[in-house]
Amino acid sequence: MKRTDNQPKFDALRKEFSTFTYERQTVKLKDGILSLAFDFDLDNRYHFRPTLEIPARPFFHWDSIPEEQLQALAFQIGMTELVSYWKIACPKKVLVKPFALTEPQKAFWKKLYYNGLGEFLYLNGITVKEEELMEFEAQGEKAFPKVEVPLEEKTLVPVGGGKDSVVTLECLRNEMPVIPMIVNPRGATLNCVKTAGYKEEEYIVVNRTLDPTMLKLNAEGYLNGHTPFSALLAFVNLLVAFGSQSRYIALSNENSANESTVPGTNINHQYSKSIEFESDFRHYVAEHLNQEVQYFSFLRPLSELQIASLFAKCKAYHPVFRSCNVGSKTDSWCGHCPKCLFTWIILSPFLTRAELVSIFGKDLMADESLRPILEELDGTAAVKPFECVGTVEEVRACLLAMQNNRLEIDEILRRFNANHFLPEKFERILKSRLHV
């Protein structure tokens, strides 16, 4: 992606718009369907109302969560959803009305916004210090309460339709009660949970709707760019974990997500998938919401290469998984983007060329138009693609393996990164799959 010089636009918008207000969140429960709406306001000129809807399932116990605690959980989602709308004009003040916020809570959100918008700021050519990005003013009369809900030995597994969540699902579903969770279902996500043997009433669906005014302003040339969607997903998972009384939330983020997209900086397309965010989120939840629920990435000890080696054995999913953002709406591989090329490369040591062509529809390594993307992936170019892709080291190891040199691949496959938050029983399961 090319950088633009939107610093003048950023400065002008911050002069034109002074305050972004989080007015309220609305929570409704009817016929087992939980509906959330968030009201945001930009200087009394633009109003936004994004929504979430969670269809009824037999394992939900929404009535067991006191109203104020449910409001507290919804509030966290609203605080994360807010960033997508705030970034339109980036006003210096964020006015928060639903609850009071302590200084540590403000610090958590400020860090998340700044780092989660690192790619947005970089690609828009915007330079601003973290302490100058925004100030929170909370007008709520009282702090949000802690959440006290009995939790059981059940595990939520968010399913995105790619290889990583499939590996987590396959490793865990025969070891413990597992509930898959899908945001805005599409072909790949539905086909993956169905391939795993789950019926509709056995997995969670969350329908998220963006406010059309934001899309209209984006089209009119207001500021736009990447936001920390995985952070929003974290708080949505927290809500449905309490609703389903599940103690564990098992993400599928690997240790490759910790690598900066722009070398020598903290700019990371995958910041809200990184171990740094995971650590901050766990601390925030334990300190301010609940100490019993456990949020962690099951695949954190692994590299993308190790995950690919496990996924290669999951043959039933090969026709249905998709990791291509460009082709997500048509449930296809576009064959022209960094995600497609990276997925081909990372699977290449474990699948035959015929198997790969069967998945992607063509030989991506024979497509000369993809060479510039290959140079971004293998470190020849200065900056990695702004996509969820693995490390330069892994890509280079796969390219060497294509020339029958598997020494680096074999070395990477023997690793097990100790920097993770897996509960002991989950670590045992993962090591047994790796034969560590």
Image (cartoon, grey):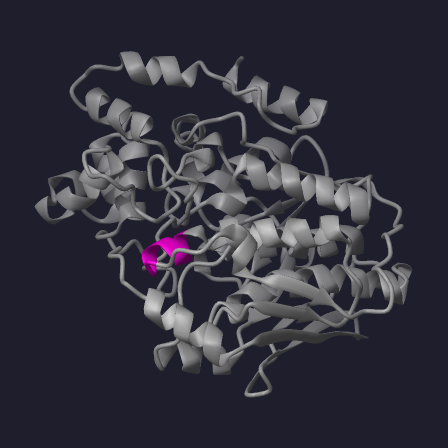
Q: Would residue 417 be visible to someone looking at this image?
A: yes
Task: State how many labels appear.
Answer: 0
Asked if residue 362 is among those painted magenta in the image, a careful observer would answer no
Q: Main secondary structure of the magenta part?
A: helix
The image quarter containing residue 380 is top left
Going by the image, does 266 lie left or right of 102? left
- State the residue at coordinates (59%, 46%): 197
Of all residues shown, which one is farthest toward the left? Answer: 368
Going by the image, does 61 lie left or right of 45? right
Which of these two is toward me, 174 or 406? 406
- State the residue at coordinates (65%, 28%): 422
Which of these two is toward me, 121 or 278? 121
- State the residue at coordinates (60%, 74%): 20
The image quarter containing residue 411 is top left
- State the residue at coordinates (36%, 41%): 261
Q: Would residue 251 be visible to someone looking at this image?
A: no
First to last magenta residue range: 119-125
Location of the N terminus (image quadrant): bottom left
Going by the image, does 230 lie left or right of 138? left
Residue 246: percent from the left, percent from the top?
Answer: 77, 45
In this rendering, is residue 312 above or below 77? above
Which of these two is toward me, 165 or 214? 214
Residue 331: percent from the left, percent from the top?
Answer: 37, 60
Going by the image, does 69 lie left or right of 307? right
Asked if residue 120 is among those painted magenta in the image, a careful observer would answer yes
Which of these two is toward me, 424 or 26? 26
